Amino acid sequence: MKTLDRYLIRHFMVNFAILFCVLVTLFVLIDMIIDLDEFLQASENTAKRWQAEANGVKSYGQGDVNDPKTSQLVRAFVYTVIGYYAPMVVTLYVYMCGLVVVGATGFSLAALVRAGELTAIVTSGVSMFRVAAPMLVVGCILNCIAMPLQELVIPKLAHKLSRSKKDLKKGEEFHQFAVTYEGDNQGNLFSAAEYLPLRGELWSVRIVQIDRTDHHFVRRIMANQAIWEPEQGGWKLIDAYALYPDTRLAGGASVPTVDFVESDLSPTVLMARRADRYPAVLSVGQLRQLINSKSLDARKARRMSMVLHSRFSMLIVNVLIQVLVLPFFLLREPASLMTQAAKAAGVCIGAWGMFLFGSQTGATLLPPVTAAWMPVFLYVPMSVFLIQTVKT
């Protein structure tokens, strides 16, 4: 049986690799062609920056450096495309591995049926379920690989995955943006001219502190810089001072200095408030921290909870959908493979699409936990019913 298992697994993995590469290639080509002008502009800016750095010029605006050569533009274009889409390959695997596993299962079984190998295997006394077992085991492993990628790799690439194509033209400054009166659980309103998520820094900071009991103004803090301190749970202030309602600056009066402000307004919270798609690149621990901190509005908190539970339910749904495809190809009698493939595609893509649609909109109608796990309870009896139709 080990020889048969190796043979089936080899066919399955080859089909999986081919399908995933085709999927990634199609996604990159279509998405890149649609916004080709953004990549061309970004690559031109990158080439100018490289040329300016080579010439020892800090600015690469118009008139500072000569127009880059064609070879430099081509190299910058390749660099920009790879830099933008390479992190997305990991995300594509996490969200599309279930569908690719289903496709690899269908292609592998269809090849066995077309070559008459499935009939020969069954004739030798091997059951249909025994033929499908290696593919199910490997499919579960491939789906489980998505979990460590989601938890360990994607959060480190969050700053790249959360940018848009327009941000590419800004070069290395794509992650900088202003913060305007963002509130926290301590009654503080944060404003900053620049925010750098990669460093966890705020520049030209203004903090308005309001008493949460009677909502009156307490003080205003002015700081040149603020650095996030995760161990202390707040922002370390550099060159900061406080202005109280009765503070008098005339006549050389001094104002008190401030070194630290406790707050739950972490860099993760700031990014989550800014971009709706940002929760998809957070780890389970970060999602739990955001939900428990109550620093988000009700709509985004429900969204966070939905994303959290969908991480686990999606793994089970992917396995169940792979089970759904088996009865369409585990056939003892001759049948049209095109017809069986069309039926399998309709059932599996429909089930997977319903899960994605429910994960996006279900939280607005149902509790997040119910909306995330409802597809599992629907697909379990469906997969059990279909698998019973297989003639072993």
Image: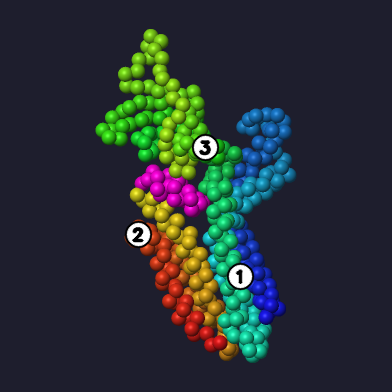
Q: Earlier in the sequence, mark 1 or mark 2?
A: 1
| Amino acid on which the number 3 mark rests in the picture | Gly
Q: Earlier in the sequence, mark 1 or mark 3?
A: 1
| Amino acid on which the number 2 mark rests in the picture | Pro
In what quadrant of the picture does the C terminus appear? bottom right
Badge 1: how crowded within 10 Å, few (<14), some, or many (20+)?
some
Q: Earlier in the sequence, mark 2 or mark 3?
A: 3
Is residue 291 in view? Answer: yes
Question: Which residue bears the numbered disc 1?
Answer: 138
- Distance from the alpha carbon under mark 1 to that under mark 2: 33 Å
The image's colour scheme reads rainbow
Q: Which mark is residue 200?
A: 3
Residue 185 x, y percent position in the rendering: 37, 39
Magenta part mainly helix, strand or loop? helix
Q: Quadrant of residue 273?
A: top left
Report if the CB atoms under discs 1 and 2 are less than 8 Å apart. Answer: no
- Distance from the alpha carbon under mark 2 to that under mark 3: 33 Å
Q: Which mark is residue 367?
A: 2
Q: What stretch of residues is rendered in magenta? A: 271-297
Label 1: state its secondary structure.
helix
What residue is rendered at 48% in x and 59% in y? 311
Label 2: state its secondary structure.
loop
For the residue pair 226 and 115, the one nearer the viewer reads as: 226
